[in-house]
Image (cartoon, rainbow, N blue to C red):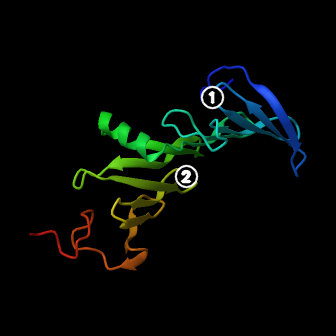
C-alpha cells in the first residue's frame, strides 16, 4: 500500500477493459469512490479519488489523482481543493499550499501551488515546469486580479526572459517587476 491513502474497505463496483489491454476498476469507499487504472500486466498506474457526488475529491490533504511508474514510484500527484478550503488554509498558515507534484530527475518536485501575496493579501496560483535535469525551466504566476507573470530560465539556472500578461494579453513589463501592475511604476 502507498502513503497517500488510508487503508479502508473498498467495494468493487465495476471493471472496464482499457484500449491498451489494461483495466479500469471502479470502487465505492468510505468517503466516495475511487478509480484505479491497471496496466495490461496488472501494475497500478493511476488512482483517482471521487467524492460522494462522483466529482474529483476536493481536499488539501487527500490527492484527487496519483500516477505510478512500473517501479512503483509515484510520478504525479494532484490535489484539487476548493476556494473555501484554500482560504481556510491561509487563515491558519502563510506557507504555500502545494497542489501538484511530478517526478523530475528522481525527485517529486512541486508543479503547482497557491501562495499568499503579502502586498495585496490575495491568493495567487503558481505553476512550475522543469528541465529533465531538475532545474526550473519556467514559473508562471496567476494573480488574483487576473494579471499573470511568466519567467523562463536556461538549464543552467540563469533567467532567460520575463513576460507580463493583463486581461490575457501580453503587455510591456511594469517598471517594478513583482509588484501588482497598476499602470504606474510603484514609486508613489
Q: Is residue 56 visible?
A: yes
Q: Quadrant of the C terminus?
A: bottom left
x, y percentage for residue 38? 81, 38
Q: Is mark 2 on a helix, strand or loop?
A: loop
Image side of residue 40 versus residue 62, left or right: right
| Residue 50 lies in quadrant | top right
Pointer 1 local density, CA inside 10 Å: few below 14, some 14–19, many at least 20: few
- Local secondary structure at mark 1: loop
Label placed on residue 22: none
Pick out the residue farthest to the left: 188
Instruction: Please say if the residues under marks 2 and 1 sit with CB atoms less than 8 Å apart.
Output: no
Q: Name the residue under label 1.
A: 31
Per the rendering, the mark at residue 133 is: 2
In the shown orientation, is residue 94 left or right of residue 142? left
Q: Position of residue 59 (x, y in %)?
A: 51, 37
- In the rendered view, does 23 fall on the left or right side of 86? right
Quadrant of res 14: top right
Figure quadrant of the N terminus: top right
Q: As displayed, is residue 119 above or below residue 160?
A: above
Query: Could you give the CA–CA distance between mark 2 and mark 1, rounded to whole angstroms?
Result: 39 Å
Q: How crowded is mark 2: few (under 14 residues within 10 Å), some or many (20 or more)?
A: few
In the rendered image, is residue 93 in sight?
Answer: no
Amino acid at each position: 500500500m502507498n502513503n497517500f491513502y488510508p487503508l479502508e474497505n473498498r467495494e468493487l463496483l465495476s471493471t472496464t477493459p482499457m484500449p491498451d489491454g489494461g483495466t479500469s476498476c471502479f470502487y465505492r469507499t468510505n468517503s466516495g469512490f475511487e478509480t484505479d487504472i491497471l496496466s495490461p500486466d496488472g501494475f497500478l498506474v493511476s488512482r483517482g479519488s471521487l467524492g460522494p457526488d462522483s466529482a474529483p475529491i476536493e481536499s488539501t490533504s487527500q490527492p484527487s489523482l496519483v500516477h505510478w511508474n512500473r517501479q512503483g514510484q509515484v510520478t504525479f500527484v494532484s490535489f484539487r481543493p476548493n476556494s473555501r478550503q484554500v482560504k481556510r488554509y491561509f487563515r491558519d498558515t502563510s506557507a504555500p499550499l502545494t497542489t501538484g507534484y511530478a517526478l523530475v530527475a528522481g525527485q517529486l518536485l512541486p508543479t503547482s501551488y497557491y501562495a499568499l501575496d503579502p502586498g495585496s493579501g490575495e491568493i495567487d496560483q503558481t505553476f512550475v515546469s522543469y528541465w529533465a535535469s531538475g532545474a526550473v525551466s519556467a514559473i508562471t504566476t496567476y494573480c488574483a486580479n487576473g494579471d499573470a507573470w511568466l519567467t523562463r530560465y536556461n538549464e543552467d539556472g540563469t533567467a532567460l526572459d520575463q513576460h507580463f500578461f493583463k486581461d490575457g494579453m501580453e503587455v510591456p513589463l511594469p517598471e517594478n517587476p513583482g509588484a501588482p501592475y497598476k499602470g504606474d511604476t510603484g514609486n508613489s
